Image (cartoon, rainbow, N blue to C red):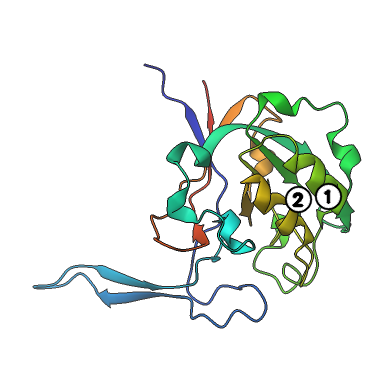
């Protein structure tokens, strides 16, 4: 049996890392005990469901829509296509023309590589970023996809929700704060973004990975 090559597309979760502006949920990785005589290492976690690389279920913006535990496991994995659309410097709306000539019928996920993840950990990261235009979100929602992902904080600009509102009724998950997309090919790989089994929640941190056949 061939073992696929795995590429990590996730940011590490660390104490006091930057979060979505206005998110006051504490973010801590607490060391409850450390190695020593009669003791061992044990840790505790405090963070919100939208921490780091995470997925939004349709429930995030659509009341009554499926949450994290309502979706089948196969909704969190499938074939992916990467669209290169930025150099990490220019920001703005991503237009529907990015999908011209793309066969979305053969993929489950579309990922947009804007190279914005290079600013992760800086004050710039959550100040502005490229996001989906309504027209692009509409084309994605009509394509029968399982989800869409970006290497930015959100499908929408800060304070916006139109792209979320368009994708949620289509049953799509949103994958946000991806990284390392430059390490994967444009197509021909499997994406896996399994969430924690958090009952009645709208989002979950994930370990996003690309699986490439050797």
> Where residue 130 appears, x then y in whole percent?
82, 57
Which picture quadrant has residue 144?
A: top right
The residues tagged by marks 2 and 1 sit, at their Cα atoms, a distance apart of 5 Å
Residue 90 left/right relative to 141: right
Q: Which residue is drawn at 74% across and 45% down?
A: 113
> Where residue 70 appears, x then y in whole percent?
45, 50
Asked if labels 1 and 2 touch by Cβ distance under 8 angstroms, the answer is: yes
Which picture quadrant has residue 176?
A: bottom right
Q: Please identify the residue farthest to the left as the structure is shown.
A: 38
Q: Is label 2 in a helix, a strand or a loop? A: loop
Say above or below: 44 vs 199: below
Tag 2 residue: 115
Residue 207 left/right relative to 131: left
Say above or below: 101 vs 157: above
The image's mark for residue 143 is none
Compare residues 17 and 171 and report the one nearer the observer.
Answer: 171
Q: How many marks?
A: 2
Tag 1 residue: 87
Q: Residue at x 31, y 75 (%)?
A: 31
Which picture quadrant has residue 102?
A: top right
Q: Residue at x 62, y 33 (%)?
A: 108
Q: Residues within 10 Å of mark 2 (few under 14, many from 20)?
A: many
Q: How crowded is mark 1: few (under 14 residues within 10 Å), some or many (20 or more)?
A: few
Q: Please identify the residue farthest to the front as the structure is shown.
A: 64
Q: Is label 1 in a helix, a strand or a loop? A: loop
Q: Quadrant of the N terminus?
A: top left
Q: Is residue 39 visible?
A: yes
> Where residue 14 appears, x then y in whole percent?
48, 68
């Amino acid at each position: 049996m061939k073992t696929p090559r795995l590429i990590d597309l996730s940011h590490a979760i660390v104490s006091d890392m930057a979060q979505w502006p206005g998110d006051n949920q504490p973010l801590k990785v607490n060391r409850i005990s450390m190695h020593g005589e009669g003791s061992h290492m044990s840790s505790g976690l405090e963070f919100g469901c939208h921490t780091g690389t995470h997925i939004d279920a349709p429930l995030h913006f659509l009341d009554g829509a499926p949450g994290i535990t309502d979706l089948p496991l196969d909704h969190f994995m499938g074939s992916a296509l990467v669209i290169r659309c930025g150099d990490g410097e220019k920001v703005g709306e991503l237009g529907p023309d990015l999908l011209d000539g793309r066969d979305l019928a053969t993929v489950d996920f579309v990922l947009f590589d804007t190279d914005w993840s290079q600013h992760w950990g800086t004050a710039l990261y959550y100040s502005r970023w490229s996001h989906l235009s309504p027209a692009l979100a509409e084309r994605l929602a009509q394509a029968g996809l399982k989800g869409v992902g970006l290497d930015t904080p959100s499908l929408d600009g800060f304070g916006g929700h139109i792209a979320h509102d368009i994708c949620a009724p289509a049953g799509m998950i949103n994958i946000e704060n991806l990284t390392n997309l430059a390490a994967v090919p444009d197509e021909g790989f499997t994406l896996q973004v399994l969430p924690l089994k958090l009952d009645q929640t709208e989002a979950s941190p994930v370990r996003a990975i690309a699986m490439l056949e050797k």
